[in-house]
Amino acid sequence: MKTRRRAATDHRGRARRRADPHYAREAERYEHPLPSRELVLQTLAEEAVPMDEAALARALGIARREREAFARRLAAMEREGQLLRNRKGALLVAERLHLVAGRVEAHPDGFGFLVPDDGGASLYLGPHEMRQVMHGDRVVARPGGLDRRGRREASIVEVTERAQKRVVGRLHRSRGIWIVAAADRRIQHDILVEPGATGEAKPGQVVTVDLTTYPAPGVQAIGRVVEVLGDYDDPGMEIEIALRKHALPFEFSRAAERIAARFPDELRKADLAGRRDLRELALVTIDGETARDFDDAVYCERAGRGFRLVVAIADVSHYVRHADALDAEARGRGNSVYFPRRVIPMLPEKLSNGLCSLNPDVDRLAMVCDMAVTPRGEITEYEFYPAVIRSHARLTYNRVAAALYGEPRRLDADTRRLAERLQVLDDAFRVLLKERERRGAIDFDTVETELVFDARGKIERIVPVYRNDAHRLIEECMLAANVCASDFLQRRKHPALYRIHEGPTPEKLAALHEFLKGFGLHLGGGEEPHAKDYAKLLERIKQRPDVQLLQTVLLRSLQQAVYSPENVGHFGLAYEHYTHFTSPIRRYPDLLIHRAIKAALAGERYDPGGWVDLGKHCSMTERRADDATRDVVTWLKCYFMKDKVGEEFDGSVSGVASFGIFVALDGIYIEGMVHISELGNDYFEHDAVRHLLRGGRTGKVFRLGDRVRVKLVRVDLEAGHLDFVPA
């Protein structure tokens, strides 16, 4: 009887799949198409009861060999808020319950927001709701009414996943009770340490705790000390905290280390099979003074009236194979993280600084993009192929700039020997630059800073780092190779992770138009501006005294670049398609592109297992690295300023908020805040469109870019804040 019922269920499932209205779409995307998301939701709605995964699979006729792929599809639908699981693990359709699934984003002031998985508007979570969750937790919530500020509120129904397993913070003792105050200010819960679970830690030290009890109504978070990092102001402690606060992987697994250790120090004959020999070609690397991992080498020669440009990129995919332990480490990290004086590499040092790095005068494996560039800077032909190369010199931006634009008499032997070849490379760069201008790519002129440390590891001074034309030369060569890589895969209809950058949202564009109107300026392009419209406006304002203000507002109007298999082009660079190919030692997306190109050259297809999820993951690891390095730099800058309380400084307003203004100090490139209560005896109205605060009684205005003089009154190292008052 049971067998007949199961057979009938399987028959209905197969019939459902045959009737899937989106079967053609799924068949176009996948070699073995699964039931569409729409059919999954329709089936759950028809059954009208929560279903476990096995029951749903039977209802849709999922074969045993399809179970794993089907489970991945359901997991993706969960992540995007289409499905929910109840406490028993059964699946439900979210819309039918009028519930919203998403991730909690906490604010240091005790409230938070629920960011829905389906991309809808964020919902406000008041302090009462936040008592039961921590930053990053996944929850299911019920939308409610509006609060007094007009924000849509939500009440948490269930916590479905805890994000925080381990927390880093400072250990304190009060009345015999040990607690840990989290270094991440978004975690407002003090964590109670279990009796006898402090180990060797002393009050005031930085520790990590494993959470054993999570917060809930009437319940405090509890944990056990598992690691003592040391005293708060120990050298390098800021990095140790950032690694744990942002959950950055920083120790390689034993399996990954074993694989790396097995590689020889030099190439073997077998490694050269099927590769072109370019060892005689005068390829060179051009990088910063302190660089240790060299991804790319370049060479250029004249070809008639145009150029042959060769960009050789370290062939990391030869060593890091799909799904091995090294690949798992690289995927988890997503990218290398560059802190001041310390690097957390994506790959073990044996590869990142050794076998994969294009060090001078040693044979190395490379993937080459060989391009033909016209006198107009157009790439008419290109070819990708694996090769063996030998870098003829390790050059730096400053040495190349001196050779091309400075004092040739002061050159070292390597640069002097290659001066003629560098001149040809510079000529090619000039035509590529003209094509960039014709294309209308945006080029914001920003100032980066470098921290100079003393022998004790403390900041001695902060200096600006200016890009010279040698930086831009290499940048144009890399852009050319990246565009060719995306074109190569797109022409072969091979899936890829594109580097996409969308234009301004309608809301940001409207605000930008309103802001520019106040300066008598206009951004062309109407409701759909092109990068060229931004570039023209930047050219028009570059001699104005308020250029930094205008440039800042233009930059903030754009969206963030991300990785995605859906190609929507790169707005800022004015490319219809663009991907990352040139840095596989330090970026996982580039490694994926190398594998895809190799597969396409062999007439095959590379499937890393979920391009969409990989795009989201790599975008996340990039933001995670940026946040961690920003934390470290902010802490170091605050430490640099802690003995300067009471001193006065000149600066510019770098940000305007409803609660005050942010001021960037001249010369030392450090930012702090003047609270609105310190601006004068007045009620100040915040104009977000015009980026200003205006006093209702006095009419006094504080606008983005205004010059101000301030006095430093407080340095909060733990919060990373500098507090100023008007001088």
Image (spheres, rainbow, N blue to C red):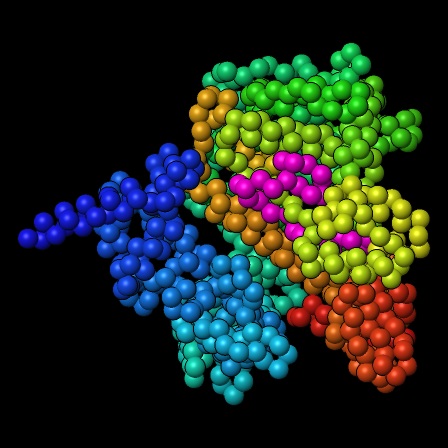
Q: Residue at x 74, y 59 (%)?
A: 510
Residue 220, image quadrant: bottom left
Q: Which residues are magenta?
A: 551-577
In magenta segment, residue 106? no
Does the rendering let one see residue 481?
A: yes
Q: Residue at x 75, y 70 (%)?
A: 657
Q: Nearer the viewer, residue 268 or 185?
A: 185
Relative side of 502 to 209, left or right: right
Q: Main secondary structure of the magenta part?
A: loop
How far across and down, in percent of the image, does residue 481 sit?
66, 29
Q: Residue at x 85, y 67 (%)?
A: 703
Position of the C terminus by quadrant: bottom right
Position of residue 648 relative to residue 74, above or below, is below
Position of residue 258 relative to residue 355, above or below, is below
Q: Residue at x 82, y 28 (%)?
A: 430
How far across and down, in percent of the image, does residue 548 sit?
85, 55
In magenta segment, residue 560? yes
Position of residue 48 relative to residue 108, above or below, is above
Does the rendering let one see residue 289?
A: no
How far across and down, in percent of the image, does residue 574 sit?
71, 38
Q: Nearer the viewer, residue 239 or 298?
A: 298
Position of residue 104 relative to residue 127, above or below, is above
